[in-house]
Image (spheres, grey):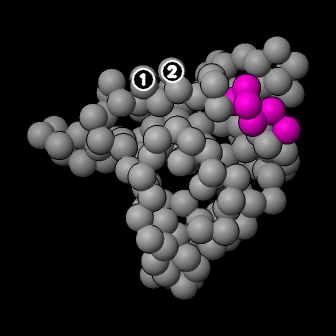
Amino acid sequence: MVEFRDPTAEDVDRLAERMREQDVAECLAAGVTDLRAAVATGVKRSARCWAATVDGELACIFGVAPMGTMLNPTGVPWLLGTDLIPKHRRIFARLSRPYIAQMLAAFPHLTNAVHAKNTVAVRWLKAMGFELQPAHAHLATGEPFHVFT
């Protein structure tokens, strides 16, 4: 059973401890070394944010943070997960669409960047209809990232 709810401080701690390898690598490639702080900041900055559990176990935390202006509201969607995401990818792909629709209702334009080596995230973004730009080197680390919209 999959449940979506507001994330708790315990969820933030649990995710930082159990983050899947590709998400850890993406954080490091973006120059982030404090995983707990990254998750907590994402939750705090998000206009909308959810924790997803599978049979009571944390699978991911995701949300959308505001960026842009009043005339051009833009949202920055993000997701950090555990190894439960790829194990239940079909369920999450099906259940993701309504949450993306909620993000688009709040922000008519969504954009962020994804580590080119995060194959699970890249595949999911394409399946959800996001367009990925060719990879460019991250300014701080030189790692390849795709901007997606």
Q: Position of residue 13 (x, y in %)?
A: 77, 42
Residue at x-position 66% and y-position 19%: 4
Task: Judge by depth and name the residue closer to the eye, 82 or 124.
Answer: 124
Task: Judge by depth and name the residue closer to the eye, 142 or 95.
Answer: 95
Residue 14 picture quarter: top right
Q: Is residue 127 above or below residue 32?
A: above
Q: Amino acid at mark 2?
A: Pro
Q: What whole-number distance in Å separates the C-alpha atoms at marks 1 and 2?
A: 6 Å
Task: Judge by depth and name the residue closer to the eye, 71 or 17.
Answer: 71
Q: Position of residue 146 (x, y in %)?
A: 48, 65
Quarter of the figure that contains the N terminus? top right
CB of mark 1 within 8 Å of CB of mark 2? Answer: yes
Residue 134 shown in magenta: no
Report helix, strand or loop for mark 2: helix
Magenta region: 87-92
Q: Is residue 42 above or below residue 141?
A: above
Q: Which dot marks residue 98?
A: 2
Q: Which dot marks residue 102?
A: 1
Label 1, residues with CA under 10 Å away: few <14, some 14-19, many ≥20: few
Q: Is residue 44 visible?
A: no
Camera-nearest label, 1 or 2: 2
How many numbered badges does the structure rendering display?
2
Q: Position of residue 126 (x, y in %)?
A: 53, 48
